[in-house]
Amino acid sequence: TIRGKLVKMAEEKKGTNVGLLAVYLIFWYGLNVQYNLYNKKILNVFAFPYTTSLIQLGSGLLYIIPKYLLFSKMGKFNAGKIALLSGFHGGGHYATVMSLGAGSVAFANVVKSAEPLVSVIMGIAFGMGMPSLMECGSLVPIIAGVAIASMAEPEFSALAFGCAMLSNFLFAARGTYAKIVMKEAKMSGSDLFAINTVFAFLLMAPITFVMEGKDVMEGFNKLCTGKGAVDFAALGNGVLAVPVGKAVGPSPEYFIAYQLVCGMYYYFYNEVAFMVLDLLDPVGQAVGNTVKRVVVIIAGTVIFNKPLTQNGIIGSSLALGGG
């Protein structure tokens, strides 16, 4: 099974806590599902992927700043290397959000299932050597399963495909390079992701302003026609009003809160992903990442009322079982 393969990969790294890895994987998958669902609902009504991406990067600052001012201490780091890493991270995130905005959750995730293969290429390019035969073999059923699960996807989009593939290369480079930086600087995955987020926000802010700055407030005001206090129960359940016909949209306060909640899901699922990277190599993390996409596809079909086809059930079973 895929769980067994990940456990074996972890055991190959001396001192890896397999129980801790299992807990991290559960939180990683759960937080990522929530992020994908909130994010897609935002993009369905708010056609500003650059701004949405920047808010998600910036939301993490609400956690990072008090944490490192009051409770933790950031270790020493090489600013040049962090800047390069943040370029991979920020660019990959923007490409992912644009892919999700241009196509369905399932389509974006089936294209992104190629990330483990790209991770192998990036590992070789960064001089980390060839992965083990077991790691390479584990990629085949997982990628095939995700592909089968979404082969009936009718919403093909060249933009969605191109952005998803671009994010594959950028995130594969991020995972590989992050492992190098963690080893050199002796930083934890949590600390590295925190400083990486700060750099990525500063890097992507001017790009966002140039691309959408002059139009975003008009789009915000057009969407946010509702009034009233923030309904925290609805917010927790991921409810986002769609202004169709006479129906009003969310209030400005509610939509801002919705974006921030989505952004916090984004930050914490990525922080946990970096903590997984602490325990596995980049290819091992990418294997777990691909299985996560099957979970996201299934959740997306339920929430957005797109039932799985027979191929979808077969493919999901194959990927989750790991062949």
Image: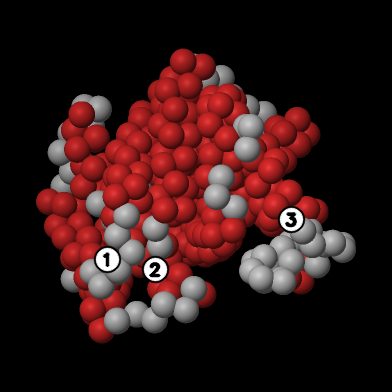
Q: Which of marks 2 and 1 is nearer the N terminus?
A: 1
Q: Which of marks 3 and 2 is nearer the N terminus?
A: 3
Task: Specify the amino acid type for callout 3.
Answer: Cys
Q: Which of marks 3 and 1 is nearer the N terminus?
A: 1
Can residue 45 be seen here? yes
Task: Specify the amino acid type for callout 1.
Answer: Val
Instruction: Name the residue that disc number 3 marks.
Output: 224
Furthest-bottom residue in view?
Answer: 310
Front position in the image: 149 or 282? 149
Instruction: Name the residue that disc number 2 marks.
Output: 297
Name the image quarter holding residue 190.
Answer: top right
Residue under the image location 64 percent in, 69 percent down? 244
* Separation of marks 2 and 1 at Cα, in angstroms: 9 Å
Task: Specify the amino acid type for callout 2.
Answer: Ile
- Residue 284 lies, in percent from the top left, at 30, 50
- Residue 136 lies, in percent from the top left, at 16, 52
Determine whether label 2 and label 1 are within 8 Å by CB.
Answer: yes
* Separation of marks 3 and 2 at Cα, in angstroms: 29 Å
Q: From the viewer's perspective, is 56 left or right of 13?
A: right
Depicted 107 relative to depicted 302: above or below: above
Secondary element under disc 1, as helix, strand or loop, is helix
Quarter of the image that includes the N terminus: bottom left
Residue under the image location 41 percent in, 77 percent down? 306
